[in-house]
Image (cartoon, helix red, strand yellow):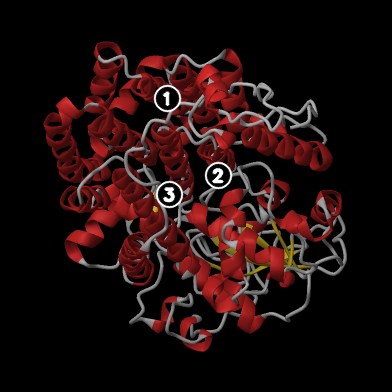
Amino acid sequence: MKDTGETVDETRVYGSETGLEAREAAPSGANGNSPEPVRAVSVPEEPDPIRGGAPVANVETWIVTLFFGVVYGVVGYFLLTDARIVNFDALQRLNEAYMVWWNSPPKLAAIPLDVAPMGSIAFMPLTLIKPLATSLVAIPVISAVAAGFLMATLNSAMRRCDFPALLRYPVLVLFGLNPMFVYYAANGDTTVLGMVLAGLALLSVITWRISTETRHLAVAGLAIGTATMFDYGYGLWALGLALAIMLIGTERESSGERQRSSLIVFLTPVAYALLVWMLLNLVILGDPFEWLTTRVGQIQVNTTGVLQAITATPGSAFGDLAEVVLGVAPLGFAAILFLLLAAFLSRNSLALGLFLLALVAIAVPVGRVLIADQADLMDLSTGLPLALLALAGMIWLYWSEEGWRVAVVVVMLIGLIAAIPLGWNAMQDYQYQNQAEAFTRWVDTGDSQEGTASVGGYTVGIDPEVAMASYIKENLPQESDSILVDENFSYGPMILSGRPKLFFDRADEGELKWEAALDDPYGTVSYMLITYSRGGDQLRKQYPEAISGGELGFTPVFRTDRYVLLEVSETRPPADQVADPGEVIPNRTPTPFTPQRPPDPLDPGSGVAVPGTTQDEAVAPTPAPAQQTGPASPGQSTAPQIEGE
């Protein structure tokens, strides 16, 4: 054998022999000389066996996804059609996604950057099908699909941690029966979409802890980074998971380089998500950190917003949080205690990491409330991600603490069972919520909740939106950009009309041109649609007397309980126009403005359109009275009668 200077793999040439034994076992050369020395190489030890197989999307996963997705989808459909309970956050996001495809011109700029955008982007595939969007069926579909995937993720986590099937399925059913989860899995809110990604991140970290396969950290980082685009609070969850990864690396006594590489694998997708988001804010808004200072929620025009005036203190914030956790996630109290005990008694690194993550998750809603000084941000839905985290912690303890399994199972089942009545009571009584009380009334009675009041200043239902959308479609010229709107408030009629190109909004030609039309709408637009149920509509601020008929150049033509449609004069009226004695100048004399409740479908003359009736049946049958030529009698309005009045 010639000396080529190459290293020979001894384990391949001489099997398992190494060192001196290998040289002794080598045959002599043809000339009787000793064989050339072979460099010895140590054989690596066998890796520790991995308990259980890695979770994969098998038949069971798809069955769980399909079963729960269909169940929540059916509940959501009847929530929309029978109960008439619509989540207006979801309604606004649906309208934004719809405008991306069908506005004039269609553009992605229809999705604003003042709230996490993925909630609107998630609706985009569904809004490609117009009837699916304009019928609002897309709203329950999106959350039901997400809920199905979340339940499949939880099932995979339990399989990964050796839960037998006879235990997995009861746990899934009990978690899925939490009334708050049922409501949010059916109402189209983006809360459950964020929970799916958070659940996938938790599953991936647990799987990495068991298998040591680094690829799971990349999945965890990608999942929690994307979840941040649904709710900025998940950005702090990423920090909590990073702490857990560091603690696991310390437990394994790995080198500092190994710990750093694990963190890099996890944090890289998170960092990329944040960098891309800051770049978008820089390019579009001129400030990479604009998203940190803008409003934290969307505008729901079906509520008075009176609770937004309630300020917060640290004591009230933690008190409200305790009430939310007790109602929605009572298992969280036990999970915190068990994780802390496992961390110190068993030196369980991931248990300590999940405990620290729980503290971070608690800090998210508390910090949001205190920074905004707005107590109503401690919404009842903030308990749902905490319920997910509590269940994930107990699943990990079941695998890692074999001597505790009986106690863990008993506590887990008690906590999940207790959440059903406690959650039901919280939905009926807790003041910061989004129509959850109306949901409990519908389940109890089966009656439509259209027009009823719900805790938090909400008026349930969408008849005002349906009526206005029907009038616009059937009575106005279908001309592009003919109706000036503030799309942050009038999104309901826009999506229900299915014709966003009729509306002149900010996404059409930019903020500056929209503001120019707002300052001088005469001859630019033919109509204005103003939302008056909530303060803040920019059209109402600009022309405060227009909705009552008291603004020269604007003629009210139709109104519902939340909106008024005004016809705009072709030319700007003279500012110094004065009425002669006995003369009535239209829109100069205010009209007493007391909108009616949504109409009774059995009373077609009640004044506004309702589902299942034609516009001719729904509009008030009596014609508007002729304009007076003399002074009005006491208590009688001199402004022209408008439809819907």
- As shown in the figure, which amino acid type bears the numbered disc 3? Val
Residue 65 visible in the shown view = yes
Q: Residues within 10 Å of mark 3 (few under 14, many from 20)?
A: many
Of residues 348 and 411, which is closer to you in this image?
348
Numbered label attached to residue 230: 2
Residue 386: name its quadrant: top left
Question: Badge 3 is on which residue?
Answer: 192
- Badge 1 density bin: few <14, some 14–19, many ≥20, Cα 10 Å: many
At a point 61% along the width and 42% down the height, the residue shown is: 115
Dot placed on the residue nearer the N-terminal end, 2 or 3:
3
Front position in the image: 545 or 480: 480
Q: Percent x, y for residue 69?
A: 36, 63
Return the residue at label 1: 357
> Relative to residue 190, is residue 101 depicted above or below?
below
Q: Earlier in the sequence, mark 2 or mark 1?
A: 2
Please give the name of the residue rendered at 23% of the width and 42% of the height, measured from the top-left corner: 423
Q: Earlier in the sequence, mark 1 or mark 3?
A: 3
Q: Residue at x 55, y 47 (%)?
A: 299
Residue type beneath disc 1: Leu
Mark whose residue sits in front, 1 or 3: 1
Image: 286 above or below 180: above
Q: Looking at the rendering, in which quadrant would you find the N terminus? A: top right
The kind of residue on which mark 2 rests is Phe
Residue contact between numbered discs 1 and 3, judged by CB atoms under 8 Å: no
Element type at mark 2: loop
Q: How far apart are the two marked residues, 2 and 1, measured between alpha carbons?
A: 19 Å
Q: Position of residue 520 (x, y in %)?
A: 85, 56
